[in-house]
Each structure stands twice: as C-alpha cells, then as structure tokens.
Amino acid sequence: MTELLPMLTTGATLAQIGDVFMHEVTLFHYLFVSAAMFALGVIGFLSRRNIIIMFLCTEMMFQGAGLAMIAFGRYHMNLTGDVFVIFILTIAAAESALALALVVLLYRRRETLDASAWAELRG
Amino acid sequence: MLLLLVVIPIVAALLIAFASPALARRIAGASSLLFFALTVACAFVFDWSDGAAFQMPFRLPLGLGDDGAAGVALEFGVDGVAMLLIMLTGLLAPLCVFGSFSSITDRVRTYYAWLLALQAPMVAVFLARDLITFYVAFEFTLVPMYVLISLFGSTNRKHAATKFFLFTFTGSLMTLAGLLYVVWFNATQLPLSGLGAGEWSFNIGVLMEAARQMSATEQAWVLLAMMCGFAVKTPLFPVHTWLPLAHTEAPTAGSVVLAGVLLKLGTYGLYRFVIPFVPVAVAEYAPLIAIISIIGIVYAGLICWVQRDVKKLVAYSSVSHLGFCVLGLFALNSVGSVGSVMYMINHGLSTGALFFCVGMMYERYHTRSLEEVGGLAKKMPVWAFFTVFFTLASVGLPGLNGFVSEIMCLLGAFQSGATWGVGGTPGPLGPWFAAVAATGMIIAAIYLLYMVGRIVFGPLREPEGHEHHGPLPVDLNRREILVLAPLAALCLFLGLYPRPALKALEAPVAHALAGVHEHRATMTANTAGALVLVETPPLGAREEATP
Amino acid sequence: MLEAISPMLTLAAADAGAQEGLRASLLVLVFPLLASIACGLCAVFGVKSKLPAWITVGALAASFVVTLMIWGQAGHNTFIAHGYEWITLAWGDGPGQQLVANLSLYIDSLTLLWMLFVTGLATLIALYASEYMSHDVGPGYCRFFAYFSLFVFSMACLVMGDNLLLLYLGWEGVGLCSYLLIGYFYTKPSAVAAAKKAFIVNRIGDLGLALGIFSVFVTFGTVEFAPLFEMLREGVDGAGAPLAGSWQATWIPVFFMIGAFGKSAQFPLYVWLPDAMEGPTPVSALIHAATMVTAGVYLIARMMPLYLLDGTHFALALVAWGGGITALLAATIGMAQFDIKRIMAYSTVSQLGFMFAGLGVLTSAGAAFHVFTHAFFKATLFLCCGAVMHGFAGQLDLRKLSGVGFMKGWGIVGIAMFIGCLNLAGFPFTAGYFSKDMILAQTFATPGYAMLGWVLLLTAGITAYYTFRVFFRVFVGPKLYEPGDEHHGDDNHSHDHDHAHEDFHPHPPGWAINSVLALLAVLSIAAAATYFINKPDHGWVGSMVHNSTADVTSPHEGTFLGMDPHKAMYYVSAIVGFIGIAIAFMLHYVGRRTSEKANADKLLPAVGPVATWAQGKWYIDELYDAVIRQPLLVLSHVFHIVDKLLVDGLVNLFGRLPTMTARALRPSQNGVLQSYAAGMAAGLVFVLLVVWALL
C-alpha cells in the first residue's frame, strides 16, 4: 500500500498498479473496498429520490467508514477501531429505527416517498 | 471629579428607569442641573492659565500589565479645548431635558433615561486620555441616540436611526483600525529603532509621540483611516447624507444634542487625533481636505435654499457650517484652529438653539413645512425674536458668536501659506481657499434669510386645524423662554467678549499644532540646505526664522 | 450728567500721531445701545405710550452733545479711546503674529465730521418718527425705536472703530438694522423681499470688504488703524518693504471698493436701495439717504492712503468711473419713475455716484462735503415725501397728487420741499450747489477725467429736471389728490377702502414733523455757509478732511475748455441746473390742469420705448434674476437631486450590499435534500483535491 501513492504521483502503468493489488491482501485492499462502499453510498444518495433507498445509501456510507476503521485497527494491532465500529453499529441501529419511523410519518403526510416533496427550508 | 461627570448621568439614568413617570421628569431635571453645575465646578477648578496641560488626571487600570502602567485603562484628563466642549455639553443637558417636557408625553421614563445616558459617553469622549476609553465612549454615544431617534422620532424614524447607526459605526471602525495600527506601531515597531519602551500602551499622549515617528506613507494611511470615522461624524461633504435624515426624524432634544455635541465629536477627533498624530500626512493632504470642506460649504448651502422642511434646512446648514470649522482647522495655524474650536462651540449654541425654535414651532403646528406655515411673528413675537436672533448668530453677524469663529476660520485659511507681508503663516492653504469659502457667507445669508422670511415674516399662514395647541400657549411659555434665554445670552457674550475663550485656547491649540510646526521646521531646514547646495537664494528670512 | 462727563474729556497737548485719551467718547456708543435695550424692555413690558421715542431722542441727543464736546476738545488731533479687548489672539511675538481688534475708538476729524451729522440727524429724525410712527404705538413702536437706536450704535462702531474688524462689525450691524427696518412691516411680502435683497446684496459687498481686511492683515500684520496709517505714511508693508507697484497696492483697494459699492449702492450692487423704500420713511431718510449709504464713501475716504499707494491709481479710476456710471444710470431711471419716494431713492444712488466720482478724482474734501450737504437736503426731501405719504394714506404716485404745498397746513412741507429740491438740483448758492461744484470742477481739473466730467454734468442737468418734476407736479399746481389705500403699518387692508375716498381728509403734519422739517430746511441752507468757513481749505468740511487720513492733494492740471474749472464750474453748473429746472417747468407745470397729465406726455411718442425701458429700470433687476439668481436656483435644485440620488444613493447602495449578496446566494438554499448533499460532496471533493495538491 505504501508504495502506491508514489506510483500514482509518478505515473505508473496500470500493470504495475495491478501488481501491487495482486501481491497480497494488504490494508490498501480494505481501504479500497471501504472507499468504494462510501462512494457508492454517496452516488446512491445523490441520484435516488426514494427516501428509503437514500437512507440505505447513508447506511452504506456508514459501513464503508466502519470497514476502514476495523482495517486500521487491525493494521495498528489495537482495538480502537473495533470499539468504534461497535459504537457505530449500535447508534446506526437506533438511528435506523428512528429514521424509519420518520419515513413512515412523512409518507403518511404526503403519500409519497419522494425526497423532493419536502423542501420547506427553501430560502 | 471627572469620573463624577460620567457617573452622574448614568446613575440618574438608572434611577429614572425605575421611577414613576412624574418623578422621572423631576429626577431628570435635577440630575441634569447637577451635571451642569459639576461642569461649571470643573471649569472653576481648571487652571486656565495652563490650558495645554491635561489637568485633573484620573486613571483606573483595567487588566493587562503587571503594574498597569501600560495596557487599557479608564483614563481621564482635560485641556482647555476639552473643558470648553464639556461646558457646552453640560449646558445643553438641562436645556434638552427642560425643553422636552411638553413634547414627550409617552414612555417618559425611557426617554429621559436614554437622554441622560447619552450625556455620559459624550462627556467621556472629551475627557478620555486612553484610546480604548475614547473609542468605547465614541461608539457608545450611538446607542442612546439610536434609541431616541427610533422610538421618539417622526414617521421615518426607523430608517433614519438605522442609517445613522450603521453609517457612523462603519466609519468609526476604520478609525479604530487606524488607531490600533498606531498602538501596534508603538509596541512593536518603535523598539526596533531603539525608541519607546515597547509596551502595549493605549495612552493618547504616548501614542501621539509614537505616531509622529511613522513614515509619511504610514501616516497617510492612518490619516485616511481616521478621516473615515471623523469625517462621517463631522460630517464632511460626500459622507453627510445621514445627518439631514437623522435630524429630520429625531425628536427636538435629539436634534439639539446631535447638532450641539455629537457632530463636535467628529471635529474634536480631527483636532485631538488627526492633527497631532499624523502631522506629515496632514500637511500634505490638508489642501485636499480643505477643498472637500469648501465643496461642502457651497454645496450644502445651496441645497439648503431649496429645502421645504425647516429642520432639514437647518440640518444641511450644519453641513455647510462645519465645512468652515474643518477648513479653519486644516489651515494649520493658530488663528484658523482657534477659530475652528470656537466654531464648534458657537455652532453648538446657535444651531442647537435653532433646533429648539423649530421644535417649539412644531409642537404648536405639527408641521415643519415652509409651505404650510409663515408669518408667525404676528402670533408668536417672542418666538420670532429668538428665531431671528439665532438665525443671525448662525449667519455670522458681527457682535454675535458666529462671526468671531467664522472670520477667524477664514482669516486662518487666508493667511495660511501667504508668503507676502508679515501676517502670513506657513501653511498649506491660501487666499483662494478663503475667497471661495467666503462665498459661503453670502449663501448662508441667502438660505437663512429665506427661511426666516418664510416662517417668521410675511403674511400669517397656518395649517388647517392648527388650534390643537394642547397645553401650550400661543406664544412661548416661561419654561421655553428659559430654555432659549441662556443660549441667547451666551451667543451675545461670546460675540461681544470672546477674549477669555480665545485666551484659553491659545495654549492648547499651539500644543496640538506643535507636531505640524516641528515637521515644517525640519522641512524648511532641509529645503534651505538643499537650496544652498544648488546656490539659489534662500527662502524669505521670516520663513527660516519660524521655529 | 454732562457736567460729570466734561472733566473726563480733558486731554494732553496735541501731537501729530494718535494718542490715547478721550475715553468718554465711548459714551457716543453707549447711549444708543442703552436706548436700544431700554426700548426692547419697553416691548417686553408692553409699554403703550410714546416712551420709547423719548428715550431714543434723549439718548441720541446725548450722543450728539458728547460728539460736540469731543470735537471741541479734540480739535484736529487724533485720539484712540480704549474700550476693552474684543478679539485678541497671539501666536508669536514678532510683527504680524498677533490678531488684535479691540473695541476701541479712533477719533480724528473725519470721524467727528461723520459722527456729528449722524448723531445730529438721527436725533432730528427720531423726533420726526415719534409722530410719524404714532399709529403704531405699542410693540411695533418699541421695536422701531430699538432698531433705530441700534442702528446709531452700529454706525458709531463703523465710523469710530479703531480697527477694521470693528468697522466690519458696524458695517454689518448697520446692514442688519437696515434689514430689520426695511422689513418693519413684516406682514408685507414686498417688504420682506426687499429686506432680504438688501441684506444679501450687501453681503456680496461685505465679502469684498472681508477679503480686503484679510489682505490688509496679511500685508501689514495688523488691522488697527493707528499702526496701519503709520505704515501707509511710509508706503511700506509690515516687514518694511515698499509697497508701491506690488499687487497688494493695486488690489486691496479694489476689495475695499467692492465693499463700499455694496453698502453705498453703486453699480452693479445698487439694486437693493430703491427696493429698500419699503421701510418706514424716517428709515429711508436716515439710513438709506443720509447716513448708512455714505459708509462706503467713509470707508474709501478713511482708507485713502491705501488708494494712493498705487501710482497708477487703478482702484481710484474704478471708483471714479463706477460712481460716474451709477450717477448717470440712476438719474435716467429716476426721470421715468412715478413713485416719489423711489425717485428720491434713485437720486440718492445718483448722488452717491457723484461722491464716489469725487473720491476717484482726488477730491475727498468735495466728496465729504457732498456727503455732508446731501445728508441734510436728502433727509429733508425724504421727510417731506414721508409727510405726504403720512397725510395721504400712503399715496406716493406723482400722477395722483397735485398742489399739496398750497393746501391748508402743508405750507412748511411745501417750503421745505422747495429748499430740498433747490439743493438737489444744484441751484446757485445752495449747499448742494457748492458741494456738487467741487466734485464737478475736480473731474475737469484732474487730468484724464474730462469725459467723466461731461457725464456728471449731464447727470446734474437730469437731476435738476427730475427733482423739479416732482416738485412741479406734487407741490404746486391745481390742488387735487387721490388718497392711497394704506394705513401704514396697519395690516388691516380689508376695511372698506371703497369709501376711503369720500371720507378721506388729508391730515396735515403735526408739530414734531413740522418743526423737524423746518429745522432741516434751515440746516440745509446753513450747510452752504460752512463752505465759506476756512475758504482756502475748501470750507469747514474740507478742513476737517484735510486734517485726517483722507487728505489728498487734488491736482490742478486740467482745464474746462481752457478755463480754470473751479471758476468756470460756478457758472456752468448753474446754467445746467437752470436748464433742467426750466425743462421741468415747461413739461410739468405750464398748462397742467389735472394731476394725471402734463405736457411731458406729449413727448412720449418721440422717445419711443426708451421711456418704458427707463421706467422698467433698464430691466437690470430682471437681468440679475435671469443671469444670477435663476441659474443659482437651478444649480441648487440640481445639487439637491444629486445629493438625494447620487450621494445618498451610493450610501444606500452600500447599505443594500449585504441584502443583495444574500439575495444572490439565496437560490442555493432550495430546500432539496439532494442538492445539499451534492454541496457536501462537492465540498468533500474540493477538500480532497486540496489535500492532493498539497501532497
């Protein structure tokens, strides 16, 4: 992983980068997956209108972040990352309960799950 | 003693806030009289023969610094100029209170509390010997005035109050920036050249010495920053537009204080900070400032002529008049500067009184329009007498106060830089400045006599349904006469016997101009040296001899 | 009281220079000032009697007596009577580093000459006014006499002040009193407008005077007369450098001239004086004929050494020609007016022009003598007009009055008017004849001014004509009249003036008016006698002038058609005067049956529109209005609009900047969840890019 950054800046060929990936499962692989999850979450959040889907996307971003933390915990050989993730999971559970309740409430108000139906804060 | 001057109005304001309305009036009257008595007492304690020294010092360190020698402090002291202006403030306070008895019937406590609270910062500005004390007081005058205008003004009062506040506040922030630069310079830059103790001093005297060490460029920037605030407050020509609005909307006493004292904070700032702090820049840019003042004199004067609202007319006349004041100040010689300080006082008396007169008319007719009222001399001879009297004082009729200061400002501008004869002084202006500014005397006669010709003389014209005088009689009652009479007496006294005031101002003004003279002396020495080098005849003997 | 004063008038032996002493002369100022205050107090306490008049008459008489005593004591010496320090400021010890203007008096024979006729005439006219103003007894009466006394005080400051600033105080003080008195009938819009005009036009002159004072201070380092004249005698400035040929020597006199032309109503600043006739007639007589308007002549006479500094006499030439042009212009206007008071006003302007011409051609004695004689006969003329106005309810139109002098009780008025007219017309052996001759002769005697002499000679003829035009139409001829519609000062115009004519009886003047008129008539004849006192010195007035700073050496090079102008003028001006009177007699007396029509009307077609133009005062008022007042007014409006829209607009623009910025940014807050998220994402990308760039 550590050799990747200089490779990116100096402009290595795709094969060279692939070599790094193929060599072994390193921290970089975990982080790559976590970044991918986060990016997918962001894209999903921005592109979808359905509130539930958007909510799921935020969960995905959450988990991306969690994965990165666990990877770092492992990398540094301590438990800080794991503890964080446990906290995040707990809070995410509570939060999703709350969020779903809100979604139900909102759906009852407007009979739709489209996020753009709520723009009360328009300036 | 000086601290009492600040404390009394504040205590009175607090008392009024918690008193019953009837009692509030009495407390206001008594405390303002006490305030006035105290200013008179100060004037007696003050040693007039040593007017340049800052007397009756008071210092209360506030934090910073181990022994409190440096750092922010509540610090007071008065010289001759400040003393005269404090007396003006003290005189106007009771007059404003007594002058408002019949016009303010609603929210009496709020009104008198804020009116009294206004006196404290005003007087503190003149007293301050510490930069932060000065600035805090300078800005705090805005708050009571804002309340007075926005709660007790006429129809457009909210707009006027906001504009007044924001305009002057923006200006004075720049001033603060300029002054803080001087503080920073004193603390960090001066020690580099082996001067100064490198302390974060806020003492105005210390800073004055420090500021003079700044380079010409720095001085020019500091001058610009300071002018931003003081020119708005004065107000000078392009930044005057808040004044007519604020005056028109303010209650009578508010206008009186505004014209009488608040505008003087600007000219006082010019006198106390600009001229002594940055003499090099002042000497360089004085012609520019003088031109701005002259434009103001003529421009505002002509605008007066087409006003339909008496109060607006008098307000614009203030702009025109203060142009003379600034012109005299930037003549940078004794005659001009003494004339200018006298102008501050005289303008406070005569224009303040004119606002009272207009207010008394307004209370009876509920209009200030020149179209609707006229020929009131027939109905209100006593009022007419006072109005004409103060108008004449304002026109600058010899024998009344306005003349002495106006002629001195003009003479100062005229002789400043004159190299012929013996009566000239070195300086940046010259006869042309005086000649153009003097047309302001003609314009003043035009618009003020126009005003008097409309409202005082001519056939009687009254608005419809004017019979609702309320409790007031047709002509002035005894209370109103007592408000105007002291002002009239002072106008006459200062016109016929200005000698004591002039004498008192000689020393402090010379002190304020010392920096300019010093700069000029070095310049002359350098120029003379240079001239000798290139073998051209040296300058006139008189100029070289100037210390 | 006078016994108490006289010991104070003791003085030291006469010397050439100014010496201190004669402090009692301050009483000349004090009496009128006290009278003014007393009259003001009368107004406060609501006095409803003639008390203010008697206070004023008493005080002015006391001033006159004190002046006489000073004259007796001072003779031809110069004194400075110290009052108190007025304006004093020092910024150094060297010359020109102190501004000193004390309330002190400079007394020399020029001062005394002026003060004698000012206080003397003021006393008489106050007495006249006590009756003239009697319909106004009450607050108006108090007001009138308070202003009247204040005027005399200011005039005394002007004439007696020992420095230019005190002179300026008096100068503007008399202007103020003039303003207040012209506007005495303050409910009349025309009176208010005239008062305003007088003050403002005077202010233009005052500007010149102020600049003159400033220049004098800078040049000489002082505004006090005593040191100033000391330097002027040497012809040097305060530093001892000779002044001849310097710009100051040329231009300072011009500044003073502008001041003098404003106060003394000379072209182009004369327009206020005719309008000033809106004031009560005693005011017109005292202020606008006899005393105040001669202040300009006094100023130039007083500053004569300054005028002589310049070898080319540039300023003096301007003064002479300014005076000459004014004299002719005003006389032509006077010929065509119908209001007798206005005719007198124009004749005053014209006569003042003579005086300035006299100063310009270097006969200050002649100018001062003409001031002196003019004061008496013009006061007489005005007071006669006033008596007519008083008796005929404000009627002043010469087409509506005739034969007044022969009506019962109007004899004294008729005779006084006749004497006044003879003087003004320059009838031989009257005072006006001698004084005018001195000026006329000198214009020919001084080389280069012969042209001016012919102009003035023509003017003298015109003067004789229009003076007697008034006399022949109003005071002699068939007894006819038509009353005016005014009950002066009484603002109640409303009450039935339809019936006024039937019920109207002209009321002839009472004892106060008659005695004053008689005395003035005698004095205007007696003034001629002073010409024969000290004859080689051009009479008593001449000797007074020669002993003051106004002394000049009149040249004798010029001739009048080869003759000695001083001798020839006795005959020439007499003939010119006769011709003028004869024409008036032919045109306005012979064959006149009604008050409206006279032979002159037959000539009207011959002169075409000129008569109308002259009657319209050559439309100079309209010209000033169009060229000066209107453009200034337009400029004011423009400034007002600029101030509102541009200057204040800019300020408001700055005030709106925050709002406008907010408004521009507002669409970004659209309330849509995703757009906020997009914003966040963009922010994230931005941060990442920055980090990227930094690494």
Image (cartoon, coloured by chain):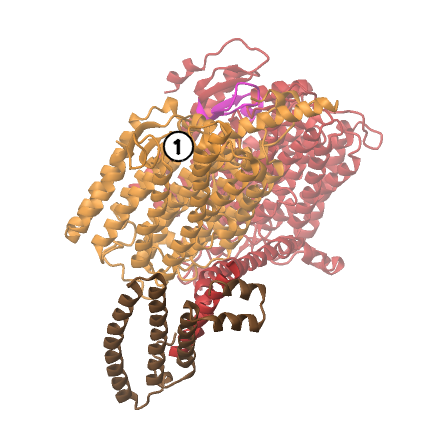
Relative to the observer, which residue lies in front, B375 or B424?
Answer: B424
Q: Residue furthest right?
A: C562
- The type of residue carrying mark 1 is Glu
Q: Say whether residue C577 is left or right of residue B122.
A: right
Q: Secondary structure at mark 1?
A: loop
Residue A45 sits inside the magenta stretch:
no
Output the letter for the chain in orange.
Answer: B
Relative to the observer, which residue lies in front, C533 or B476?
Answer: B476
Give the residue at mark 1. B199
Q: Say whether residue C448 is left or right of residue C6.
A: right
In the rendered structure, the residue with mark 1 lies on which chain? B
Residue B323 placed where, x, y %? Answer: 50, 44
Residue C413 placed where, x, y %? Answer: 52, 42
Residue C98 sits inside the magenta stretch:
yes
Q: Say whether residue C256 is left or right of residue B372.
A: right
Residue range in magenta is C84-113
Q: Is residue C525 visible?
A: yes
Output the letter for the chain in red.
Answer: C
Output the letter for the chain in brown.
Answer: A
The residue depicted at 20 percent of the width and 41 percent of the height is B30
User: In the image, is residue B67 above or below residue B184?
Assistant: above
User: In the image, is residue B277 above or below residue C600?
Assistant: above
Q: Quadrant of residue B42?
A: top left
The residue depicted at 45 percent of the width and 32 percent of the height is B208
Number of disc labels = 1
Q: Residue furthest top?
A: C13
Relative to the observer, which residue lies in front, C26 or B208?
Answer: B208
Residue C14 placed where, x, y %? Answer: 55, 10
Residue C36 placed where, x, y %? Answer: 39, 35
User: In the image, is residue B187 above or below residue C163?
Assistant: below
Q: Is residue B403 visible?
A: no
